[in-house]
């Protein structure tokens, strides 16, 4: 009996495979090993361009985005990038059911009355919480996917200064800036938060005026605007007849911040890029106007 | 002088558009297969449209990054979207069916091809579909599917998992559907 056959008989299957793995040549030629099935095309590494990762993941719900931040470092940086945050925000914004808003507006009962009146004497209350170290957090709203929080530092029950914090929930970073350099009364103050699309600055506006007694016409308005690009407060040119309602946060739309004015007769508009403050009358919508808008 | 109406069905048909419909282009995939497609369908791809505008689309357009099977799929999509009679509703339905049966690997090929050819609608549809498939999957599934190795240490990974524990809840099984 040839030696190699003898060896073949003695070795169990396991031993043979061990022998083969250890690099020894098989003693018997045997049948040719069956060709391995060709790996499927898709098991080859696909190079997925990084902008495509961002684009694909921008359609994911937020929990999936947070989960997939831990895929690897490249995904982590991609999914924490502010551009991605903006893209993701845009997708969500595009999916908003804005038609329902139009329909609700259409069925708003005040349409038939001569003037839309908006309840203004309700106190401006934002969700807030106080801490033992004398700070209070007020949730102001959101701008461009950032959450704006006002942080008041109290000293002897009075606000000594405030900061505005802009927090990015996706990157979990934020910026903050001081709002007050000295103590100001919080009472008769209109706020505005906005964003300057031209140079990417966040903008904070306040307009303050004095009212000597309750419901008296406001006097001596003054206002300042803060831009994150220049990091400085600038004065706004104001006049006695332009008074945004006190204790209100302006509505930021496009390039403007709008407040209702203090006697509910119109709107006050602050133009972000030029820093102008102007009064505009409230439009009186007719049913035809609204039908036209809807078309 | 009365002009003879050559096109009695549609009176205000743009002659340029009519010409585009009859002219055909030939696309050649990476594995040498050739596909002919009407120009009106091909110009839905911005990349091909640019080639046509620059007059370098004469003869055969080689597409070295797209293989035959993927190109055939993409051409089906283009033909449907260039069809005259198809309404928007029909097209949307077609898009839905077009991407719903695809495997993940096929989707990757199509998204790369659409990215290369710059076909906006297809790109959007396929990206959405990929995101839809992966949204409830585990991180391991994504690594396997995208052929990614994790470069985090286990401690770092554990830390991230702890941070957003709620995001990890409700993960589907890793079996590809």
Image: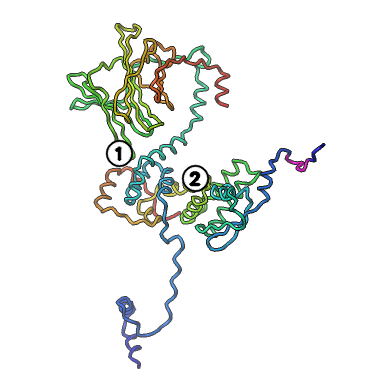
- Residue A6 pos. (x, y %): 33, 89
Range drawn in magenta: B5-10
A103 w.r.t. A9: above or below: above
Which residue is rendered at x = 57% and y = 22% of the image? A291
Query: To which chain does the residue with label 1 belong?
Result: A
Q: Position of residue B35 (x, y in %)?
A: 60, 58
Q: Residue furthest bottom?
A: A1
Is B51 above or below relative to A180? below
Residue B148 lies in the magenta-colored region: no
Q: Which residue matches tag 2?
A: B124
* Residues flagged by tags 1 and 2 on a common chain: no
Disc count in the image?
A: 2
Mark 1 lies on residue: A172
Residue in view at x 32 percent, y 10 percent:
A220
Say which element carries label 1: loop
Q: Residue at x 60, y 46 (%)?
A: B81
Q: Chain of mark 2?
A: B
User: Which one is nearer the viewer's eye here, A248 or A50?
Assistant: A50
């Amino acid at each position: 009996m040839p030696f190699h056959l003898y060896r073949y008989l003695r070795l169990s299957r396991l031993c043979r495979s061990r022998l083969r793995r250890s690099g020894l040549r098989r003693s018997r030629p045997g049948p040719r090993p069956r060709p391995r099935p060709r790996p499927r095309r898709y098991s080859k590494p696909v190079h997925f361009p990084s902008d495509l990762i961002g684009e694909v993941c921008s359609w994911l719900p937020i929990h999936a985005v947070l989960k997939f931040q831990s895929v690897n470092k490249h995904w982590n940086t991609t999914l924490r990038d502010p551009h991605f945050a903006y893209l993701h925000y845009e997708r969500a914004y595009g999916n908003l059911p804005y038609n329902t808003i139009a329909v609700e507006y259409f069925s708003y009962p005040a349409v038939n009355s001569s003037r839309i009146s908006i309840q203004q004497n309700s106190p401006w209350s934002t969700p807030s919480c106080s801490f033992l170290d004398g700070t209070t957090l007020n949730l102001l709203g959101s701008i461009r996917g950032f959450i704006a929080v006002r942080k008041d530092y109290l000293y002897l029950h009075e606000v000594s200064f405030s900061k505005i914090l802009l927090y990015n929930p996706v990157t979990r970073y934020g910026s903050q800036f001081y709002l007050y350099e000295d103590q100001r009364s919080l009472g008769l103050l209109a706020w505005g938060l906005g964003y300057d699309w031209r140079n990417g600055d966040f903008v904070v506006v306040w307009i303050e005026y004095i009212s000597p007694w309750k419901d008296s016409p406001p006097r001596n308005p003054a206002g300042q605007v803060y831009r994150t690009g220049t990091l400085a407060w600038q004065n706004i040119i104001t006049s006695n007849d332009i008074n945004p309602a006190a204790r209100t946060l302006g509505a930021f739309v496009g390039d403007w911040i709008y407040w209702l004015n203090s006697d509910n007769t119109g709107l006050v508009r602050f133009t972000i890029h030029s820093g102008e403050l102007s009064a505009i009358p409230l439009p009186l919508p007719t049913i035809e106007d609204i039908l036209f808008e809807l078309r | 002088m009365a002009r003879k109406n050559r096109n009695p069905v549609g009176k205000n048909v743009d002659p340029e558009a009519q010409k585009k419909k009859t002219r055909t282009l030939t696309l050649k995939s990476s594995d040498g297969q050739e596909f002919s497609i009407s120009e009106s369908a091909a110009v839905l791809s911005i990349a091909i449209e640019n080639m046509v505008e620059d007059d370098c689309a004469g003869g055969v357009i080689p597409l070295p990054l797209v293989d035959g099977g993927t190109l055939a799929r993409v051409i089906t999509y283009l033909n449907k979207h260039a069809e005259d009679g198809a309404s928007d509703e029909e097209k949307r339905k077609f898009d839905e069916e077009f991407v719903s049966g695809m495997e993940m690997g096929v989707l990757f090929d199509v998204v790369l091809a659409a990215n290369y050819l710059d076909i906006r609608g297809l790109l959007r549809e396929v990206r959405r579909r990929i995101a839809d498939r992966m949204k409830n999957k585990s991180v391991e599934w994504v690594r396997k599917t995208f052929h990614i190795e994790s470069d985090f240490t286990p401690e770092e990974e554990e830390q991230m998992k702890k941070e957003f524990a709620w995001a990890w809840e409700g993960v589907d099984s890793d079996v590809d559907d």
